[in-house]
Amino acid sequence: MFFHVQKMINEIVPDEPDPAAANALQEGLGGQFGEMRTMMQYLFQSFNFRGAQARPFRDLLHGIGTEEISHVELIATTIARLNDGSPRYSGNPTDLDEPAAGGATPLSNALSDGNIHHFLVGAQGAMPVDAVGNPWSGSYVYNSGNLVLDLLYNLMLESTGRLQKCRIYEMSSNRTLRSTVAYLIVRDQAHENAYAKALESLGVNWSKTLPIPKTSAEKYPEVATLLEQGLENKQYTFDLDHLSEAGKIFRSTSPSEAGQTLRTAQAPEGVPIEIADPRPEEFSPGLDPELLELVQATAELELAEADEPIRYGPAS
């Protein structure tokens, strides 16, 4: 089963809205090589896994797949931030057609920037589509049942995803976009290392079969900062009961960096989640005061009657 910690896996740096950048980032979410694809592919491979003696590989797939859920959360939230209204519009609910941006209509940028469906359908939020609006498809998911083939395909998937994110990074100087894309570039490299090391442990000379493309992403300042922290050589298990055996294949020398060591960790600390303000111009005002008061009263009643939560792992 899964648990949700109400923190974002990485900080989203604030900047001006940029709907065009948001649409480019849709490819990294719902495209053929995006985060929804990696999330579903690795989780299905782990759910369908067979062979108890190969459990470390199952645990590795499960850990990376679980992290990808957090990546979907991160990139979807980033898209919403990038779409968050006219840069100078304050969202006055009584003057929807007279925002602060020189009298321009509040959603006029929807007609010229990005994906109009972000405003027509998604209320300035992310959607499960690629950058040209094609819906995400379950047919993207590859799960052959053959461990070597699956790992090799996953290595290719992470390499292609990192290549695409480097292109997205080059498309916009927006700090909101770049903070998220840089983090995903580094974590894609970490997953490349994980799958490459898993293949090495099975006797596969992956470096001749599938050379990893050179992207020189370390020249990006945000990426360089994360590489200094060794984030590309760390694999998270997200395992509350400490039963993951992924470390049996992952704690070793890094396939991508001579002299560096791969290591496992339970989960990143994360950063607080900030819920965005309502957007009156989208007629998405949230809860009215009376309903909000009722929700709060109900929540307090349920919390008072709730049983003690189940604890997993050592008590803190």
Image: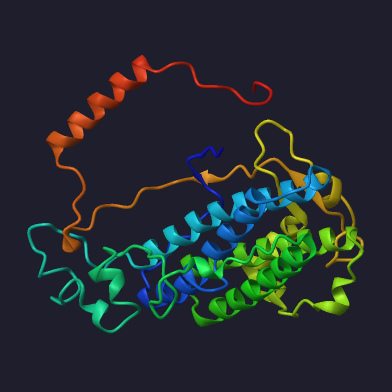
Judge whether 64 appears above or below 281 on screen: above
Residue 209 in the figure: left or right of residue 33? right
Image quarter where the C terminus lies is top right
Residue 87 appearing in the image: no
User: So how many labels did they put on this image?
Assistant: 0
160 w.r.t. 57: above or below: below
Asked whether residue 251 is in view, the answer is yes
Residue sticking out furthest to the bottom: 112
Residue 160 is left or right of residue 179, and the answer is: right
Give how far across and how far down residue 3 sits, in percent.
53, 37
Give whichever of 302, 171 is nearer the camera.
302
Q: Position of residue 296 (x, y in %)?
A: 25, 29
Name which quarter of the figure residue 313 lies in: top right
Residue at image coords 28%, 77%: 116
Which quadrant of the structure image shows residue 164? bottom right
Residue at x-position 35% and y-position 79% = 114
In this rendering, would 14 be left or right of 182?
left
The color scheme shown is rainbow
User: Quadrant of the rendered structure where residue 260 is?
Assistant: bottom right
Residue drawn at point x = 8 percent, y = 63 percent = 95
Q: Residue 78, image x and y in percent?
A: 44, 62
State the residue in front, 135 or 118: 135
Horizontally, residue 92 falls left or right of residue 235, namely: left
Q: In this view, does 182 lie above or below 214?
A: above
Identify the residue at the far left of this view.
94
Q: State which quarter of the image contains the N terminus.
A: top right
- Residue 261 point in image, percent of width and height: 87, 55
